[in-house]
Amino acid sequence: VQLQASGGGLVQPGGSLRLSCVTNRFTLEHYAIAWFRQAPGKERKGVASIGPTDDTYYIDSVKGRFAISRDIDKNTVYLQMNSLKPEDTAVYFCGTLLLGITPERMNFDNVGNWGSGTQVTVSS
């Protein structure tokens, strides 16, 4: 399974970015996809995930600011990030959760395949 993340960049606090994770239709139809992030010197942690039935899950610190969605026709999962804060700065990765793992069970050990990372920097 291939996943390609993109969309990162430098943005001021309060700004917005939209990340994209391109995969294939079969993966989107059968697996939950999650976004993780890893700040320098810290562990990679889940941020948001979406399942094959469009059920979603967010960690508390991004609820109301981030929105995960997917477009089956474009084979893409998006992470819309609004009201960005300096503490959101990290490399963001997308990954497929293991078959049968639901979005609320996203964690590092439940990822079957990792995509590339994209750097998000929130700074004035």
Image (cartoon, rainbow, N blue to C red):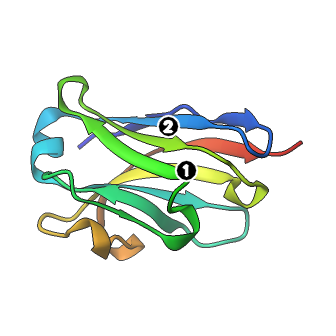
Give the CA separation, mark 2 to mark 1. Answer: 9 Å
Q: State if disc 1 and disc 2 touch (CB < 8 Å).
A: yes
Q: Is residue 7 left or right of residue 40?
A: left
**Other residues around mark 2 within 10 Å, as few (<14) / some (14–19) / many (≥20):** many
Instruction: Identify the amino acid type marked 2.
Output: Leu
Q: Is residue 79 left or right of residue 44?
A: left
Q: Which residue is under mark 2? A: 19
Q: Secondary structure at mark 1?
A: strand
Nearest the eye: 32 or 62: 62
- Where is the C terminus found, in terms of image quarters? top right
The quadrant where residue 121 appears: top right
Q: Which residue is under mark 1? A: 92
Q: Which mark is residue 5?
A: none
Say above or below: 10 vs 117.
Answer: above
- Can residue 45 be seen at all in this image of the molecule? yes
Residue occupying the point 12% across, 68% down: 100
Instruction: Identify the amino acid type marked 1.
Output: Tyr
Q: Secondary structure at mark 2?
A: strand
Nearest the eye: 26 or 114: 26
